[in-house]
Amino acid sequence: MTPRLELHHITKQYPAVRANDDVSLRVIPGEIHAVLGENGAGKSTLMKIIFGAVKPDAGHLLFNGHPMHVKSPKEARALGISMVFQHFSLFDTLTAAENVWLGLDKSLSLPEVTERIREVSRNYGLDVEPERPVHSLSVGERQRIEIVRALLTNPQLLILDEPTSVLTPQAVDNLFVMLRKLADQGCSILYISHKLDEIRALCHRCTVMRAGKVTGEVDPRLESNASLSRLMIGAEPPELLRQAATLGEVALLVKNLDLPTDDPFGTSLEHINLQVRAGEIVGIAGVSGNGQGALMAALSGEDRRSPRGSITLFGKDVSRMGPAHRRRLGLNSVPEERLGRGAVPTLSLAQNTLLTRDNAIGPGGWLRVQGVKAMAQNLIERYKVKAGGPQALAKSLSGGNLQKFIMGREIDARPEVLLVSQPTWGVDVGAAAQIRGELLALRDAGCAVLLVSEELNELFEISDRLMVISQGRLSPSIPTADATVEQIGTWMSGLWKDEEAEHVQA
């Protein structure tokens, strides 16, 4: 069988790092082929070379047995290659349908594209509302738009870069059904992920990369998580050391918070009640788009419309305070969106530390430049961020490395209350274990942590109590030790009862 794609001795050198070093790869028609590696291993650069977004310094490519010289993503799509990037390329002010339409040839009208989106969404179990503007969508909903846009081109080769990083378990199952159906129809799929269980369940072959080089090619169905980890990072991820929580005072208290959405497609918050004590991690599960963003915006101070008295921090009413004021009172937050909210793409890592840290500002408002650089360098070293030093631009980092830097920046601030959305989105198994360990260490030091995640395994692993958000409503809390995946899954559909709430709270 003629391979769908062949890469021979691909090399790509950047000023600070060799992203790809003599990489060879082969994918056959109908194969789901995983590319596995830790953050900064060179996976995304390799995919961009295939998609025509990056030009290699050496090596050559073949597509369906013919030399391949694509100079742009447009040429790659014309050849039959589509890619869903980890960092989305959508215009916030346009609707989902308009964004999809922009990436297609204009043989179809916008109404026709809208109908095609609905058809593909139904066929593959991807819930996409074509008329909604992108700025009103959650990260998970935006990812579904990218996947639908790729499918509308009828690709021969589909590249997916961390496609499940913000999908719920149910949505992941639907995605796998869709990918298997595509593969059965002859489409080849390159699947980039850090999730070892997914790769073992879905993929036929797996190429493992480390530091820009290929370290092995295996059948993941015959491997264990431990053996894949050793190929990927040279060791197994460390086990989390967790001890019983020592609860302190109520740090964050939300009482009867009703907050109507100011977006026609947003989710209103209804009668939210929660408390987080010093020394505990409270996890919030939920299907993407059920009010997680609105809740975190209200708690962080990004949305200052909360009724007076509805949000208190160590007994002080902060309902109408902005983020800077809340930070001075000990509350830090990590937003769901890395680029644009968590970090400014065009600023250096050193400059991005100043977004939430003011201890590098000296008398008279002068910056301690060397102190800022030293702070950024410390974060790079401590969290093993692969970057070209403190002066590297945020947009130059891989998604997982940027996530490690942002998480490190907020954890290193030693907050008294930390709000976190999707803490391990797109990071490898070793980095995920480190981040979760750091969150547990914060909790053990007396910090109150509110964790919003669509990774149920993560929530069960480090949370002391669990809650679920559904359609802007918050379930009662339940000790994690008493919860089951089935119960949390039922609650994620909004199916909890008043008597159940009374029993749990009692």
Image (tube, helix red, strand yellow):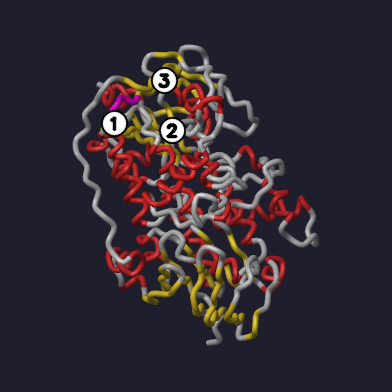
Q: Residue at x 44, y 31 (%)?
A: 332
- In the displayed structure, 200 sits above or below 425; it is below
- In the displayed structure, 408 sits above or below 299; it is below
Secondary structure, mark 2, is strand
Q: Earlier in the sequence, mark 3 or mark 1?
A: 3
Front residue of this view, candidates 100 and 235: 235
Q: Which residue is mark 3?
A: 254
Q: Residue 418: where, in percent of width, then height?
A: 39, 32
Within 10 Å of disc 1 (Cα), the crowding (few <14, some 14-19, many 20+) is many
Most extreme residue toward the left, as rendered?
Answer: 244
**Magenta residue span:** 276-280
- The C terminus: image quadrant: top left
Within 10 Å of disc 3 (Cα), the crowding (few <14, some 14-19, many 20+) is some
Q: Residue 408: where, in percent of width, then height?
A: 41, 43
Q: Which residue is mark 2?
A: 469
Q: Residue 402: where, in percent of width, then height?
A: 49, 50
- Under mark 1, the amino acid is Glu
- Under mark 2, the amino acid is Ile
Determine if residue 77 is in view: yes
Q: Earlier in the sequence, mark 1 or mark 2?
A: 1
Q: Which residue is mark 1?
A: 280
- Under mark 3, the amino acid is Val
Q: Is residue 13 left or right of residue 275?
A: right
